[in-house]
Image (cartoon, helix red, strand yellow):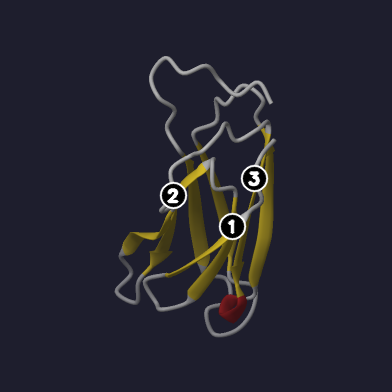
Amino acid sequence: MARHNRDGRGKDQRGHEYVLSYQPDWLQQVKVTRELESGRRSTKALFRNPSAAEQAPGPRVRTQVRVPELGIDFEVELSDARGIVRRITVETVVPDGPEQGEPVLISIARKRSRPGAPPSSG
């Protein structure tokens, strides 16, 4: 049985705070890619999960990303009974405000399993 989601936070290249809800035994890190004022694209690690996996994550994984200042709020739910998904990438745009229409790319990475470890049977 998977453990309850945990909360995490991180700031992007422009100082906007991202609020995350994640499964502690599955998530390794979350990165964000944004365009800077200079026009250059930049990728930044928003959050790294500080805890080690205590058990197999289970066949369903949920991660929520909220950025109240930008009006972004979505949740990804993944069914991965064999534990083969390594990364989820979501591309969205800022829906409102001065940065409206600007793309935001969020990459959610899974913890690597130990070599030879059996996949979750959850």
Numbered tag placed on residue 51 in the rendering: 2
Label 2: state its secondary structure. loop
**Mark 3 to mark 2: distance in Å?**
13 Å
User: Residue beneath label 1, please?
Assistant: 6
Disc 2 and disc 1 in contact, CB within 8 angstroms: yes
Q: Is residue 80 left or right of residue 14?
A: right
Disc 1 and disc 3 in contact, CB within 8 angstroms: no
**Mark 1 to mark 3: distance in Å?**
9 Å
Q: At 41% across and 53% down in the image, what residue appears?
A: 50
Label 1: state its secondary structure. strand
Label 3: state its secondary structure. loop
Name the quarter where the C terminus is drawn.
top right
Q: At 64% across and 79% down in the image, what residue appears?
A: 96
Numbered tag placed on residue 3 in the rendering: 3
Q: Earlier in the sequence, mark 2 or mark 1?
A: 1
Q: On screen, 2 above or below 121?
A: below
**Mark 2 to mark 1: distance in Å?**
11 Å
**Mark 2: which amino acid?**
Ser
